[in-house]
Image (cartoon, coloured by chain):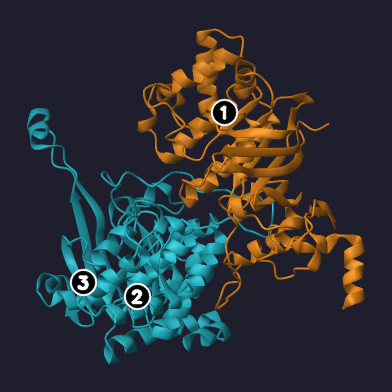
Amino acid sequence: MSLLQVKNLVVEFRHRRGTLRALDDISFDIAPGEILGVVGESGAGKSLTGASIIGLLEPPGRVASGEILLEGRRIDNLPFDEMRKVRGRQIGAIFQDPLTSLNPLYSVGRQLIETITTHLPVNQAEARQRAIQLLRDTGIPAAEQRIDHFSHQFSGGMRQRVVIALALAAEPQLIVADEPTTALDVSIQAQIITLLKNICKERGAAVMLITHDMGVIAETCDRVAVMYAGRIAEIGPVHEVINHPAHPYTAGLMACIPDMSVDRERLHQIDGAMPRLNAIPAGCAYNPRCDRVLDRCHDERPDLMPAGVTRAACWLHAPAVARGEEVSQ
Amino acid sequence: MSAQPIDLTTPAVVVHQAAPATAQTVSVASEPLVRATDLAKTFDVSAPWLNRVLERQPRQLLRAVDGVSFDIPRGETLALVGESGCGKSTVARLLVGLYEPTRGGFEFDGQDAHAAFKTPAGRQLRRRIQMIFQDPYASLNPRWVVEDIIAEPLREHGIETEPVALRARVDALLHSVGLSPHDRVKYPHQFSGGQRQRISIARALATQPEFLVCDEPTSALDVSVQAQVLNIMKDLQRERGLTYLFISHNLAVVRHVSDRVGVMYLGRLVELAPKHTLFDTPRHPYTRMLLDAIPKMHDTGKARTPVSGEVPNPLNPPTGCAFNPRCPHVNERCRNERPELQTIGGVRVACHAVEEGRI
């Protein structure tokens, strides 16, 4: 049974001149203990998907249709106070910038203890012990002293460790990590990724890891969803998606990344840019940039369909069309 | 560009031996375009005078760049890599004259650039050195249309003042970076990040510079857009014989664009080598650590052992080698004596362990 199920999620922004559909028919699920990567370019809707799950969509954004279920219980229509209990207790969140996700006026200990006592039946002293243990688990040296320090007294990497400790404070089953390493240096990034991976494996927490960095995805995730213009273009086991991409967009994205082992004079490039929300092309949103475009792509929108081991939203994998194409050629 | 296929076909060993030899012949036969000698920049970050007196605090000096020497032959790309706070961007700002060096200096085409910047003739020099900044959202004036942005350097340097010819120049520049002449009348907010970075490139190219200092030009961009910008930069280099100083923290990008790579740590160069040598046989422990830290795309799910520790506070750097608290090969000498950059086995490296043959 899946821990998290997202079914046909649609998120819209209403404004004076109409409605923008930012997420369009997103469906996926996450099993307990699984790490799902969500990758895509800026504006693809990665963060919005994360924000909808933790119930922190900023108005005027709203879930227009679809369902989000956590352990079979709908959480997308919960009242604010109910959702507050779920958030923190069952779903933890880690954001990109560790400086803005910590309160600069409270010591990190106070923030940790507050989270622990809100969600778990423990007293202050127990909560403090627990907080120290969490800091220790996330690799902060001299946790007994550091617990009374303020966020500005920590370096960027240490701050992100505190944020991870905070997200884990109430033992959530799911952690939504939105670009947790983007603001960090490469060596620190490697430390944080390893920490996140190990600590979640130990505690059996599932992770939804949102990032634009394919390298981080390759190293960390079990499965990956590639997003484009508010839809999932491809979803499947990470090894398959990276080495045998089924969707032309995934293939293009992978080819853009400079490869450390090959010398190339020019990088592969996908011409053009992702469409704006008010100008998403008819049919497949990727069709103007696609190098394997079919007639059908211009007016019929593909849904996710099986493509080998993965699932891709691409007409190339529609059985009838694949045959038809061979005939026409 | 003719060196490229040779590098590919010759075994790495030959590149090793060839590298210092060519460096010498270049310096004897034709001067490199850019030569930095013992370049240093110290910032005074002391508390205000009254606080220092009342609280008896000493002056605090931050050595952002501490004695960096390198040269860049004409038409080549030198990349500087390192983590935040290592002084990469300060080097960039020193080279375009935004900062004045505390010590040392740099020669551009045989003349002392910082002395020249102060004279009226320095304008001519500034025309030949241009910079591309990291953030295309912050480096373009939001209230100017693209035409004004790109024409500004042309007007400022008096290269083109006649309106019709100016417009033609702007159109040609837009075309060279893959934008349309219709974009001339648009404002920066009407463009995506990658297009804005192309506008910055067009602006930098307006004065027909020979040397471009690029400070993290693609860090703010998505990978597909990054590929477009890197391709344009390489095409322009080939067409116009440009010389680049390319600053980045992304080693894969550096490997793609550069001819030689300098690795910086706390304001000093720790290793300087031709790119294939550096990526195939890194010598300095810090370079090895950086290379290990890159996620490997195609062996998914493999665990790594990341190097522990963080970059020390530059206000209070460790004695001896600055990398010693994180280095797996540290010994007593590393803690006390600072290693100098020296040529060992064909590459420039500052490490006692490499010098003593311990690694």
Q: Are tags 3 and 1 found on a single chain? A: no
Q: Amino acid at mark 1?
A: Ala
Mark toward the viewer: 3 or 2: 3
Q: Which chain is orange?
A: A
Q: Dot 1: within a 10 Å radius of its alpha carbon, few (fewer than 14), some, or many (20 or more) residues?
A: many
| A233 sits to left or right of A49 | right
Q: Which chain is cyan?
A: B
Q: Amino acid at mark 2?
A: Leu
Task: Please tell me the numbered disc located at residue A266.
Answer: none
- The x and y percentages for residue B340 are 29, 64
Say if B235 sits above or below B98 in the image: below
Name of the residue lying farthest toward the front: A17
Task: Please tell me the numbered disc located at residue B156.
Answer: 3
Name of the residue lying farthest toward the top: A123
The one nearer the camera, A323 or B234, is A323
Per the image, label 2 sits on a secondary structure element best described as helix
List the residue tagged with mark 1: A167
Say if A15 sits above or below B137 in the image: above
Mark toward the viewer: 1 or 2: 2
Please state the chain letter of the residue tagged with numbered disc 1 in the rendered image.
A
Please state the chain letter of the residue tagged with numbered disc 2 in the rendered image.
B
Please state the chain letter of the residue tagged with numbered disc 3 in the rendered image.
B
Q: Dot 2: within a 10 Å radius of its alpha carbon, few (fewer than 14), some, or many (20 or more) residues?
A: many
List the residue tagged with mark 2: B205
Q: Contact (CB < 8 A) between labels 1 and 2?
A: no
Per the image, label 1 sits on a secondary structure element best described as helix
